[in-house]
């Protein structure tokens, strides 16, 4: 693969970063989770494979195809805008909308059925980044809006944006508590204070995956941010403790098969959708 091809294929770089986190977790003996099983491997491999091989390419192709038919004159219409302006557009139309989509899936039981696979893992790891129902990403507004921006000529900016975003998301899901090291360096306190309120970190995101709020750390009713934790700060859903929950997973919901987690509503049990506990305002 030559340099030009590499520059125009952010997926190659993202895959390399993903592999680097896998190797890091393997080196630290935290990639093979003792609390996981074959069921978890199936969900992660199949769910990730569908997103990478089917959903993402399909959305990019469909968005471009539909726009080329509907507004052919708008092709590359934004290609000349300042680079930073284009980057901000991706932050708003992709990352911020993903924050609201993520938040909504925790409030609407039928939508949580598309997201529960991500939370059913009893551990944190880069393995779970793409662990979601096969329809979760297909309905995510940010991916479609990114396709629109790419059609409008912002593909080169998207490549950089995607690499940055996925690097932060991989780092936030990783079982390696790399941010703990930063908290212990007094000279970095002002920088870390800003960092943890701007970007997702293992500390803030692991709190979102905790099993029960009774542990004082878990915050599954917030910490929804993906690239930017700033959205949680701005919209009142942030909780920063610099600690990790003692356990991860889902409470208040009966277990379902891995097939239902991945393919609901095509595959479903007699329950039509997860029901919210009377004391729960947010679907788990």
Image: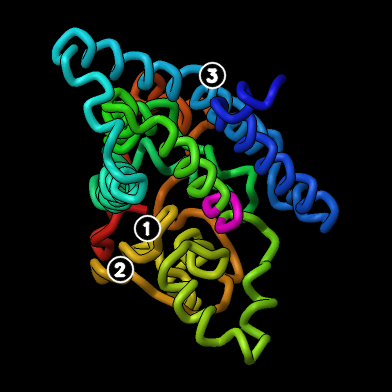
- Number of numbered discs present? 3
Is label 2 in contact with label 1 (beta carbons under 8 Å)? yes
Which sits in the foreground, 8 or 79? 79
Task: Report the residue at 45% width, 77% height from top.
Answer: 194
Q: Residue at x 53, y 25 (%)?
A: 52
**Residue at horizontal 69 percent and vertical 37 percent from the top:** 16
> Nearer the observer, disc 2 or disc 3?
3
Q: Which mark is residue 53?
A: 3
- For residue 138, which quarter of the picture? top left
The residues bearing labels 1 and 3 have C-alpha atoms spaced at a distance of: 26 Å
Nearest to N terminus: mark 1 or mark 3 = 3
Please tell me whether residue 222 belongs to the stretch shown in magenta.
Answer: no
Q: Position of residue 9 (x, y in %)?
A: 57, 26
- The residues tagged by marks 2 and 1 sit, at their Cα atoms, a distance apart of 8 Å
The image shows residue 10 at horizontal and vertical percentages of 56, 32
Instruction: Name the residue carrying label 1.
Output: 224
Q: Secondary structure at mark 1?
A: loop
For label 1, the crowd category at 10 Å Cα-Cα, with few meaning under 14, some 14 to 19 and many 20 or more, is many
> Which residue is label 2 attached to?
237
Query: Looking at the picture, how far across and down is residue 51, in whole percent?
Result: 49, 26
Q: Is label 2 in a helix, a strand or a loop?
A: loop
Crowdedness of circle 3 by 10 Å Cα count: few (<14), some, many (20+)?
few
**Which residues lie in the magenta part?**
168-172
10 Å crowding of disc 2: few (<14), some (14-19), many (20+): some
Residue 235 drawn at (x, y percent): 24, 66
Q: Nearer the viewer, residue 93 or 115?
A: 93
Work out whether residue 254 or residue 216 is closer to the camera in this orientation and state it. 216
Given residues 175 and 58, the one toward you in this image is: 58
Q: Is residue 44 left or right of residue 135?
A: right
Q: Is residue 121 left or right of residue 75?
A: right
Q: Quadrant of residue 19?
A: top right
Q: Report the magenta stretch's main SS.
A: helix
């Amino acid at each position: 693969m030559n340099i030009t091809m590499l520059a125009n294929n952010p997926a190659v770089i993202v895959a390399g970063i993903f592999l680097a986190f896998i190797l890091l977790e393997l080196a630290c003996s935290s990639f093979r989770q003792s609390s996981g099983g074959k069921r978890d491997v199936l969900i992660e491999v199949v769910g990730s494979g569908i997103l990478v091989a089917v959903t993402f390419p399909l959305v990019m192709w469909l968005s471009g195809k539909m726009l080329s038919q509907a507004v052919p004159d708008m092709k590359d219409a934004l290609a000349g805008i300042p680079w930073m302006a284009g980057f901000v557009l991706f932050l708003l139309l992709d990352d911020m909308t993903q924050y609201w989509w993520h938040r909504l899936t925790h409030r609407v039981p039928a939508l949580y059925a598309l997201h529960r696979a991500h939370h059913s893992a009893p551990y944190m790891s880069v393995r779970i980044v793409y662990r979601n129902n096969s329809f979760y990403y297909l309905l995510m507004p940010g991916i479609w809006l990114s396709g629109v921006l790419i059609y409008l000529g912002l593909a080169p900016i998207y490549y950089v944006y995607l690499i940055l975003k996925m690097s932060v998301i991989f780092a936030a899901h990783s079982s390696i508590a790399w941010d703990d090291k930063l908290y212990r360096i007094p000279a970095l306190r002002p920088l870390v204070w800003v960092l943890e309120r701007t970007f997702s970190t293992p500390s803030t995101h692991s709190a979102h995956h905790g099993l029960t709020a009774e542990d004082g750390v878990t915050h599954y009713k917030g910490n929804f941010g993906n690239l930017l934790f700033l959205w949680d700060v701005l919209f009142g859903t942030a909780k920063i403790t610099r600690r990790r929950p003692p356990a991860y997973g889902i409470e208040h919901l009966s277990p379902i098969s891995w097939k239902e987690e991945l393919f609901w509503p095509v595959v479903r049990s007699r329950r039509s959708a997860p029901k919210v506990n009377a004391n729960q305002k947010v679907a788990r």
